[in-house]
Image (cartoon, rainbow, N blue to C red):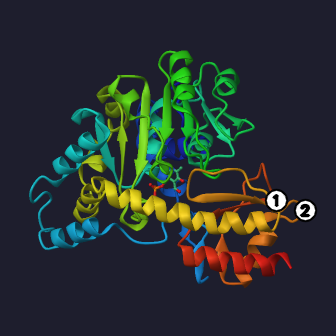
Amino acid sequence: MTEQTSLPEDARDDLLDRGYSRRQLARVAGIFGAGAVAASLGRPAWASGGVPDPAPTAKVRIGANECWTGPLLPGQRAAQKIIANSNRYAPQDERNDFLKAVMAVEGVPYDHIAPWPGSSDPLSRAIVSFCSPQRGLVTADPTFELAGRTADWLGAPVKRVPLTAEYAHDVRAMLAADPNAGLYYICTPNNPTGTITPIPDIEWLIANKPAGSIVLVDEAYTHFAGVPVASPLVTAGRDVIVLRTFSKIFGMAGMRMGFTMARPDILAKMIRYDGGMQSGALPLPSLACATASLTAAPLIAARRAEMVQARGIALDHLRARNIVVKPTSANMIMIDWKTRPAKDVQAAFRAQSVEIGRSWPIWPTVSRVTVGSATEMKAFCVALDKVMA
Ligand SMILES: Cc1ncc(COP(=O)(O)O)c(C=O)c1O
């Protein structure tokens, strides 16, 4: 029997050497894929090769698309309160409270929601669940790379499709690039460009994609943009997964909380091998913090306004220096240094104790700068003047 698995050759050989049967390989691929891929490839910006880099020592850290400040106060209070009862797996059914909060805010049914420790794990899992050597991934370029890296690791074909002139996802070109893909990945607002792919474009892709495939909409930065979201497509029962994280506007990157919204049959495929253990058992302080934060609409709006104001400081300064940047709807700005490699510019900023973001291979002279606090953006402007001098 020649069992096709999505495992890379070296991993497959290793498993066979250790006594796994060929029939077990496909199942192992699921476990190995989601776990190991999330651990080794879903690493956050600070980690490399499985060994965490030391945290940047720069005074101003505007490189990793984190929030400039910690969790919203109601979230902090809820997290602190529950620590004393954390001897229990579920002192008062906190998971249920979280699901009800998502239902109330997003309008999706209860059984269409799965919480996770961050959004990297479910992002990798979705690739493991819906892509294979036969059914590949279509993603944008540039975009958040985890989906593409996971598919590469699994040996699933990957098509990387350039953004449109407005830096939206070119959904028609994405479908044309692989009309039989297993998953189409849309990041909106897109990391690193901060640009929106309109919901009608996403609807078009869902309506025209092949049967059995999934459109994954990663809305990690959506609260920064305040634009229409894709959760109604979940409620409408479409072939879509909507991915959210608390690592961005909610200031909880180190607390590891996220959730997916999708039809129950889609979620079942993502949790099939661990029976929902990853999704079911989450650190209580993180869960409580997320529940209290998600429902704090006025505080979310205030934080968005604070980001817009801080972003404006940087944008005004760039404009005054005749540095043209594309419009962005999220907490990031892409700056083209034209003749200077982005890596060199990043090093020059680091010398000013300002850690800006990286570049993407498709645009080697463009850096991503995360919007921090107003004070941080003023420091960025001062450093920019020195770097450009
Ligand atoms: C678009 C996007 N999706 C997902 C993630 C994963 O974040 P986390 O695992 O912290 O939820 C990130 C992190 O930067 C991101 O930018």
Residue 320: x and y in percent read: 78, 67
Circle 1 crowding by C-alpha within 10 Å: few under 14, some 14–19, many from 20: many
Q: Is residue 204 above or below residue 5?
A: above
Q: Is residue 99 left or right of residue 135?
A: left
Secondary structure of the residue carrying numbered label 2:
loop
Pointer 2 residue Cβ closer than 8 Å to ligand 1: no
Q: Which residue is mark 1?
A: 365
Q: Nearer the viewer, residue 176 or 67?
A: 67
Residue 175: x and y, percent?
Answer: 64, 23
Q: Which residue is denoted by mark 2 in the rendering?
A: 339
Residue drawn 68% across the image and 63% down it: 315
Above-or-below relation of 375 to 130: below
Question: Is residue 363 rendered to the left or right of residue 129?
Answer: right
Structural distance between the alpha carbons of marks 2 and 1: 7 Å
Residue 366: give x, y in percent of width and height.
77, 58
User: What amino acid is at disc 2?
Assistant: Thr
What is the x, y in percent for residue 130?
48, 30
- Is the C terminus in the top left, top right, bottom left or bottom right quadrant? bottom right
The residue sitting at the left extreme is: 92
* Image position of 124 with respect to 42: above or below: above
